[in-house]
Image (spheres, coloured by chain):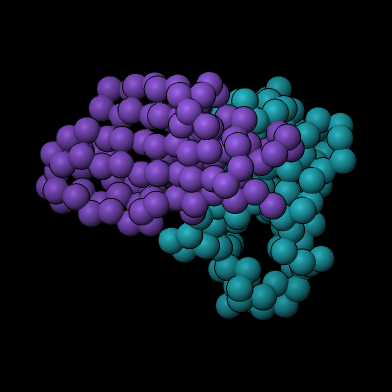
């Protein structure tokens, strides 16, 4: 596959449950971002992985959110004890390191917390 | 942290009219990217501007970077229904290497 893929495309979960969202970036891309987009809103930065450097976690809204990137490739965003306000589309993007390269976005995971 | 203001938030135009969205920052930007997100889709890269006063064109779209590198604009000439979507500006946040996305301008085009 040539693009960024994300799974699942849709996730409905009950309040209080944990969820894992997966992102498969474009092969060779060294940087990976997670964003959150609530209905009709802009992109909220969550976390940024850049090569082997420590991730920039400055956008994570609470300690219920965590992410890891294994082997410099696949990334997983975990939300523990989900709340209704976590409902949103979670977008992953990959690129080369630095802000001079375009970001390639995946189709997103729509999370609904009931 | 660095933030950008994008205006207007929404714009409704008749097909054939022109459209402009503006991205303003209180600090000098090193570079800026623009993205388009169609309804139900994900953001797609349009252009990157790096130089002061830079102007780039893509068919009916004209992108500008201000002389002071504190603002940028996207102008669409003679809009078409295919232009519908949300347009985001995304400058680099300081020297962090990451982009800071504006809130976007949502364009509706009446046929």
Residue B15 in picture, x, y percent from top left:
14, 43
Residue B101 in picture, x, y percent from top left:
55, 46
Q: Colour of chain A?
A: cyan
Q: Is residue B6 above or below residue B44?
A: below
Residue B46 in picture, x, y percent from top left:
43, 30
Query: Which residue occupies the foreground of this view, A9 or A92?
Result: A92
Q: Quadrant of the N terminus of chain A?
A: top right
Q: Which chain is purple?
A: B
Q: Is residue A37 above or below residue B56?
A: below
| Residue occupying the point 43% across, 61% down | A40
Residue A74 in picture, x, y percent from top left:
74, 38
Snapshot quadrant of residue B10: bottom left
Position of A113 compared to B33: left or right?
right
| Residue occupying the point 70% across, 28% down | A98
| Residue occupying the point 28% across, 53% down | B11
Snapshot quadrant of residue B56: top left
């Amino acid at each position: 596959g040539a693009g960024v893929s994300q799974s699942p495309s849709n996730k409905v979960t009950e309040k209080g449950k944990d969820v894992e969202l997966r992102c498969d970036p474009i092969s060779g891309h060294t940087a990976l971002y997670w964003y959150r987009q609530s209905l009709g809103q802009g992109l909220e930065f969550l976390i940024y992985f850049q090569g082997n450097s420590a991730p920039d976690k400055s956008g994570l809204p609470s300690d219920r959110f965590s992410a890891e990137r294994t082997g410099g490739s696949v990334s997983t965003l975990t939300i523990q004890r989900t709340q209704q306000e976590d409902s949103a589309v979670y977008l992953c993007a990959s690129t080369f390191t630095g802000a001079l390269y375009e970001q390639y976005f995946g189709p997103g995971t729509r999370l609904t917390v009931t | 942290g660095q933030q950008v203001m994008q205006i207007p938030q929404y714009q409704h135009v008749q097909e054939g009219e022109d459209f402009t969205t503006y991205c303003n920052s209180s600090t000098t930007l090193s570079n800026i990217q623009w993205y388009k997100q169609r309804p139900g889709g994900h953001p797609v890269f349009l252009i990157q501007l790096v130089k002061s006063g830079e102007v780039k064109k893509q068919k009916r779209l004209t992108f500008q970077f201000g002389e002071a590198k504190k603002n940028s604009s996207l102008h669409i000439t003679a809009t078409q229904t295919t232009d519908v979507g949300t347009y985001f500006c995304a400058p680099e946040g300081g020297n962090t290497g990451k982009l800071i996305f504006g809130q976007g301008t949502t364009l509706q085009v009446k046929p």
